Amino acid sequence: MPSPKRHHFVPRAYLARFGLGDQVRVRTRGSAAYYTTNVVNVAVRAGFYTTTSSDGSTSTAVEEELAQLDDVGIQAMRDIDVAGRPPELGSRGREVLSLYLAAQMTRTPRRRTMMLFPEAVVAYAQGRELDRDLVTEYLQCEHLGYVPESAEVEGAWSFLHGTLNMHGAPTNGVVLD
């Protein structure tokens, strides 16, 4: 069986619950215009969950595991539709639904960008000192595409500094200001 190439960060079956059949109305962030399309074209990125191992081989195991969670999560929602109430406390259905919803909160491109932010800034630094000026430069040139507000710089700096100090993320010998 071929490995999946198009990875949905919002499952198609979940999206379909908000449309008619497999068709949903979509509005792109920052635009007032809507269009209708098939759920297969929404919230998807090629290779989004593909990982690379230390030997250089690629794997779609994350996508395959998420697909299994999606299947049982959607079934838990269908069970709610039939029963007219959520699964009982302590039941397997409640556990599955909770895991499914928690996964949905963490699997978006925005969340991934946030989690990889410290690593991306360290790589961007290329051995330069990690200070607020470098964070400002990174935000402007790589992350935002415009000059950040001072509060954005402070928030990014605090997140970067705290993460590197707490978790010892790879600093490649870079000194924190």
Image: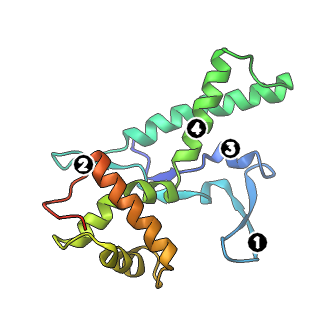
Around disc 4, counting alpha carbons within 10 Å, would you say few (fewer than 14), some (14 to 19), or many (20 or more)? Answer: few
Which of pointers 1 and 2 indicates the residue nearer the eye? 2
Q: Earlier in the sequence, mark 4 or mark 3?
A: 3
Place of residue 102 in the rendered image (x, y in percent of width and height, measured from the top left): 58, 38
Q: Earlier in the sequence, mark 1 or mark 4?
A: 1
Q: CA distance from mark 4 to mark 2?
A: 26 Å
Q: Residue 17: give x, y in percent of width and height.
A: 76, 45
State the residue position of label 3.
14
Does 77 sit left or right of 155 as displayed? right
The quadrant in which the N terminus is found is top left
Which of label 4 and label 2 is nearer to you? Answer: 2
Residue at (76% x, 71% y) in the render = 34
Q: Secondary structure at mark 1?
A: strand
| Type of amino acid at the residue the image marks with label 3 | Tyr
Q: Nearer the viewer, mark 3 or mark 2?
A: 2
Q: Quickly name the residue at label 2.
A: 168
CA gap, disc 4 to disc 3? Answer: 14 Å
Residue tagged 4: 102
**Which numbered disc, 4 or 3, marks the residue closer to the eye?**
4
Q: What residue lies at 18% left-to-right and 64% top-to-bottom?
A: 175
Q: Do the numbered discs 1 and 2 sit on residues whose CB atoms are within 8 Å?
A: no
Q: Nearer the viewer, residue 35 or 166?
A: 166
Q: Earlier in the sequence, mark 3 or mark 2?
A: 3
CA separation, marks 3 and 1? 19 Å
Image quadrant of residue 131? bottom left
Residue 136, by quadrant, is bottom left
Looking at marks 3 and 1 on the same chain, the residue that comes earlier in the sequence is marked by 3
Where residue 108 appears, as percent x and y from the top left, is: 53, 53
Residue wearing tag 1: 34
Q: In the structure shown, which secondary structural element does the residue marked by tag 2 occupy?
A: loop
Residue type at mark 4: give it.
Ala
Residue furthest bottom as drawn: 147
